[in-house]
Image (cartoon, helix red, strand yellow):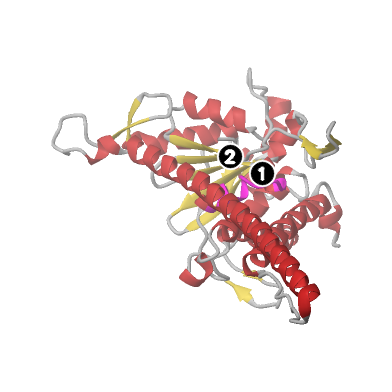
Amino acid sequence: MKETEMGGGGEKAFQDIGNAYRRIKAEIERQEKRRTEQPKKTITSHNGGSSRRKIDNSRSNTRKQRRKLSASSDDDEDSISSRATAIGARLKDHRELVNGLFANDNKALDQTSSANRSTTGNGEVTSLQNAVSNQSQMLSDMNVVPIDAGATNVNENNQIITNSCFYLSLAASYLSGVGAFATDPTAIYSKQSFSKEESSQTVEMDIVTLPKKEKQLTKKLALQLKRAIEAAVMLVHPDWASSGMVGEEVQAFSDFLVYALDSDSILAHWSIAVFDEASGFVDVYRGRHYGKVYPPTSVISRHGKEKLRYNDCDVETKRANTLTLRYIPGHYQPLLPELTKMSIEKRKIRKAGYTYERATLEEILCLLKKWNVLHVVTDGRA
């Protein structure tokens, strides 16, 4: 591995995401085998009573085998169906909540002071004109800035694949959190900001891109994420590949996260906030095991069965597992904490009550309410 892959949590990140993909892929293969497996035909003889008894026994065994395979298949189908139903219900609830938040904006625009209004997560009413401003202030409070991780990647066959910005953004945000980057990609923002007489001024500049080494590392992990997340989607919707919903160059969308965050892999330990710059809206996805140690501890119950025990993790792990993305029409970018800037401010300014660290999910939820930012939380624990 390259030096950047070995530093910080880079190597472990690759192992964990690789394991997630292999686990989901193995489950897909098991389910496919169960669906296609048929009872073996029994060859019988017609030589006297002894043969008849063999025939009867063979038929009995065949019926038992069929019942067993049928029950296994039914259980498997029920499991897939129930998981698909549960995830579908979450996505439906998510869409209904989003529609509810923006419902007031679809009312007659001639009503005085009622046009472009919506309800925030804490029940307060805010105008959509202010929604983008509220989100911007929240991001400033978090000390995160967008970095462009690109939109193209290279697959296992060394072929260029497009529309990969979603996975590249996830990978960059995660690698930044686990300390895998050799340098701070946001340092250039801080350099220009502190060159001004007043460091609190907003500095208008182009969105910077990931440095070369960090980008190569991000591309490798992004491909693994693409494989793992799309496998989780295909586990529930095997027909989506043929319908064009999932594919090598198909643009992913954030609702794909629901399928991965419901799994038993490292992905279920993540929480992800997607900030839509155009509307000021924020989608928050909480993994089923966010806040727990990965991997879980294997324990044997009194009945001899193996169970997984999920212990609480420390706050630093929560910070690393909380990812933030920015969405602009047709493109995703990672929102990374300004580590260099926060380090300088921590020494020079020291704002009261400010942590100067990457935000956890809990801190993001508090800031969403503080700034009245429109948002919906999709919880994998439900």
> Is residue 41 shown left or right of residue 106?
right
> Is residue 377 shown left or right of residue 154?
left
Image quarter of residue 6 = bottom right
Q: Amino acid at mark 2?
A: Gly
Q: Point out the residue furthest to the front here.
A: 49
For image coordinates 46% across by 53% down, the residue present is 328
Image quarter of residue 301 = top right
Which x, y percent locates residue 68?
68, 57
Instruction: For the residues labelled 2 and 1, say whether their Cβ atoms are less than 8 Å apart.
Output: yes
Q: Residue tagged by mark 2?
A: 380
* SS state under label 1: helix
Is residue 264 shown in magenta? yes
* SS state under label 2: loop
Q: Nearer the viewer, residue 279 or 47?
A: 47
Bounds of the magenta segment = 256-266
297 is higher (above) or lower (below) than 80: above
Q: Point out the residue furthest to the top here.
A: 352
Q: Residue tagged by mark 1?
A: 268
As measured in the structure, the alpha-carbon distance from the residue carrying label 2 to the one carrying label 1 is 8 Å
Is residue 223 shown in magenta? no
For image coordinates 86% across by 62% down, the residue present is 1
